[in-house]
Amino acid sequence: MARSEGRAGWAGAVFLALYSTLWRVAAPVLPLLLPRLRPGWTHRLGWCFRPGPADIWIQAASGGEAYLALEILEAFMPGTEFRVLLTTCTAQGEEILVRGLEGKSWEGRVQIRFFPFDVPGISLGLIRGAGIDLMILLETEIWPGLLEACRRAGVQIWVVNGRMTEKSRRGYVRLGGLLAGRGPSRVLAVSEADGARFQSVFPDALVERMSNIKFDRAAVPLVPDRDGPSWTAEGNGLFVFGSLRREEEHLILPVFPELARRHPQVIPAIFPRHMERVESWEKALIAADLPVCRLSRMEAPCPPGTILLGDVFGRLGQAYTRASWAFVGGSLAPCGGQNFLEPLACGVRPVIGPHWKNFAWVGQEIIDLGLVLQIGSAADLVRVPDLNPEARELILKRAGDFMAARRGGAAQAAREILGFFDRIAGGRDTISGPKTL
């Protein structure tokens, strides 16, 4: 047994050495190959990244996780003196975090940085330099270098709002003992199935169930932003195509000519999931002889027959507050779907395609109740405006009833974090595990 553990430890050390070497070799050229990594490049390399003192480090991979981080902060920061380091991998995530903290009384106790490249030495320097006591990873983030840095520093790792697909589980299991002793000490999973998958990868972790924080965010309807010109003229309806993924663009593009023919009073509004796809969409629409107007350049309502292109990050939610109909992308191609609770929280019944496994945690009941409309193919989108939009007030009431029993994830996470620091203050900073759900 001891020999087996020794081999696993040796293999893990070799893996981490090779892994770190690959990162160090690739890091200087990655921004040249992947433009989305250029923002915050010096932070990612660990240069000019000297955070002030922080008790908690929360890593939010991208935009969706950034919103979760803000919900957690809202739940536990007021009335405390905690200092928090927030990191994210994307420019979108950073923008959401910066905007979300504006005007908060505790804004000065939160630092925002780009997540460093996953070299243990870089993360270890940050952990020790800031004096981190607790590392929180949101949803599904397993960074071997960061896990190793936390192990060396003796810092506990928690996965909050944890979810893991079966495909990811199989991949992590194949790493075998390479992650042994380097996993999270605690996982708060959003479903029993997700918890079981985490437990199979990290058998020593304490795995518990929590409400999905996304229900907390979806429960708060956005206030319409009426600054600037109206998006559509009176008598025209806005049909938002939100969070479109690259893999489904070729399926959706042919919809617009037929949509214009059948419903000339409908203004389609395209919001790509990734902003770097805006240029490609504009070129494709022009090549298809379809008039296009960028949101950033709009000075008057979009005329009929024109397609509005959402090229301003962070405006999708406002688009939903103005929409009569909304399609949520990532669901026509097998991409797993995108967040269809957001338009629902704005009083619009969302339309999705057949692929939404990433949001299976919401449950089939939301479709059975008619709160979400599922279609079989892109061709069905041209018939969506035939459905008279249901009154926003009624949609909000029905959606609110559905979500009421499912809220509370952010408050639960906050209680657990406060409990952790209470245990530290009392000299009891250990987590017992494993534990079944």
Image (cartoon, rainbow, N blue to C red):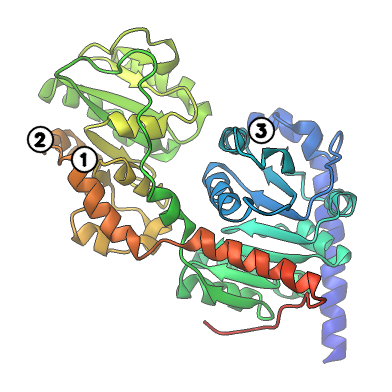
In the picture, residue 393 is in which quadrant? Answer: top left
Q: Residues within 10 Å of mark 1 (few under 14, many from 20)?
A: some
In this rendering, is residue 83 above or below 165?
above
Q: CA distance from mark 3 to mark 1?
A: 41 Å
Of 360 and 77, which appears nearest the observer? 77
In the picture, residue 300 is in which quadrant? Answer: top left
| Element under disc 2 | helix
x and y percentages locating residue 285 in the rendered image = 34, 18
Judge whether residue 57 can be spotted in this image. yes
Query: Disc 2 or disc 1, which is closer to the eye?
Result: 1
Residue hosting label 2: 386
Circles 3 and 2: CB atoms closer than 8 Å: no
Give the label on residue 34, or none.
3
Q: Is residue 271 left or right of residue 387?
A: right
x and y percentages locating residue 321 in the rendered image = 31, 33
x and y percentages locating residue 375 in the rendered image = 21, 48
> What is the three-letter code of the residue carrying label 1?
Arg
Q: Is residue 47 left or right of residue 62?
A: right
Q: Point out the tag, 3 or 2, that comes first from the N-terminus.
A: 3
Residue under the image location 25 percent in, 47 percent down:
396
Q: Is residue 64 left or right of residue 131?
A: left
Query: Disc 3 or disc 1, which is closer to the eye?
Result: 1
Residue hosting label 1: 392
